[in-house]
Amino acid sequence: MASPLIIKTCYLSARHLHHHRHHDHCSFLFSTTSPKPPKFHSLKSIKMEGANEITEEAKESVNQNKRKIFVAGATGSTGKSIVEQLLAKGFEVKAGVRDLAKARATFSKHGPSLQIVIADVTEGSDKLVQAIGDDSEAVICATGFRPGWDLFAPWKVDNLGTVNLVEACRKLGVKRFILISSILVNGAAMGQILNPAYIFLNIFGLTLVAKLQAENHIRKSGINYTIVRPGGLRNEPPSGNLVMEPEDTLYEGTISRDLVAEVAVEALGLPEASYKVVEIVSRADAPKRTYEDLFGSIKQK
């Protein structure tokens, strides 16, 4: 029988499960350091020979060096952290949200590197094509259903919504997709069908089953993917070091949302993260490792 500690962790994970749509679902964070993306030159630092002002051509050339990432579920707790970390690393970000007013309030202090667009993943891939646009080179999905009376909400958001995002990427030719999922999505195959967390989270409209179906679609899509399965999500700053394991390994543990966001952002530029499913938690006794080492230790399936 599960201990009270596991049940408590399960309960806390479920409360924070709904990753987005403006919440975060079942996911865990980890933290380590890895090389930062190339620095981007500011317009102020570039001068055309024989002129005091920058031409429009020069501005366009500089802007092309900035990489734009689309984040679905950007106003959720984990999504917000992903957006902020991307901006801090010099990326341009297109934040996909359902509630424009909430998004403007959430990101009121950010400048022109952030673009906010309406994007409801349940409304089909054609509308998402318009939201993502042809200027986004990667998509990070941090969506999650809102708890409520609609028992089909997890299926609409965590399964069909993610599928819609993937299909929009295929139509646009976007070749990089990162999904924030959850540990225990394949709990039945792991022999964890009686795990209190697996039972509790699936009470919400078969949430974990819906996520697993979406994962399977991503893996068959042909897109370069990284699926990040965090443990129970915590709002506190990261503590301890990141633990990364292969799929269907972890069945307990927690992680800071900020650390989960860091993993997603770091995965963007690492070849070692391509076509992989990783499970993450943080532990005080875990050794500190680089992201190259962590992702490199996980074999593709």
Image (cartoon, rainbow, N blue to C red):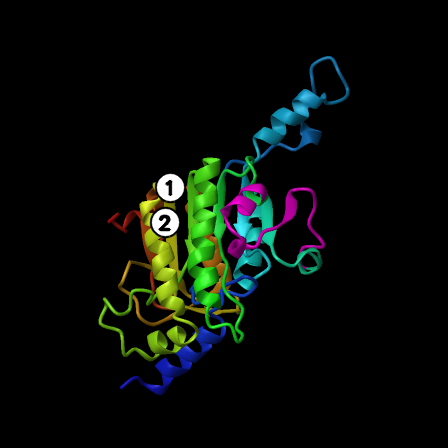
* Residue 282: x %, y % from top left: 39, 65
Q: Residues within 10 Å of mark 1 (few under 14, many from 20)?
A: many
Left or right of 73? Residue 251 is: left
Magenta stretch holds residue 125: yes
Q: Tag 1 or tag 2, which sits nearer the N-term?
A: 2
Magenta residues, start to end: 106-130
Looking at the image, which residue is at 73% across and 12% down? Answer: 50
Q: Quadrant of residue 191?
A: bottom left
**Can you say whether 300 is above or below 12 in the image?**
above
Magenta stretch holds residue 109: yes
Mark 2 to mark 1 CA distance (whole Å): 7 Å
Q: Quadrant of residue 30?
A: bottom left
Q: Out of 178 and 208, give the one closest to the viewer.
A: 208
Q: Which mark is residue 223?
A: 1
Looking at the image, which residue is at 35% across and 58% down? Answer: 213
Q: Which mark is residue 256?
A: none
Q: At label 1, which amino acid type do we have? A: Ile
Looking at the image, which residue is at 49% across and 75% down? Answer: 15
Query: Exactly how many numbered labels are in the figure?
Result: 2
Q: Secondary structure at mark 2?
A: helix
Q: In which quadrant will I find the N terminus?
A: bottom left
Residue 91 visible, this angle: no
* Residue 270: x %, y % from top left: 39, 42
Residue 104 visible, this angle: yes
Q: Which residue is mark 2?
A: 218
Q: Residues within 10 Å of mark 2 (few under 14, many from 20)?
A: many
Q: At label 2, which amino acid type do we have? A: Ile
Q: Out of 130 and 52, give the one closest to the viewer.
A: 130
* Residue 22: x %, y % from top left: 57, 63
* Residue 72: x %, y % from top left: 53, 53
The answer to whether mark 2 and mark 1 are in CB contact below 8 A is: yes
Q: Secondary structure at mark 1?
A: loop
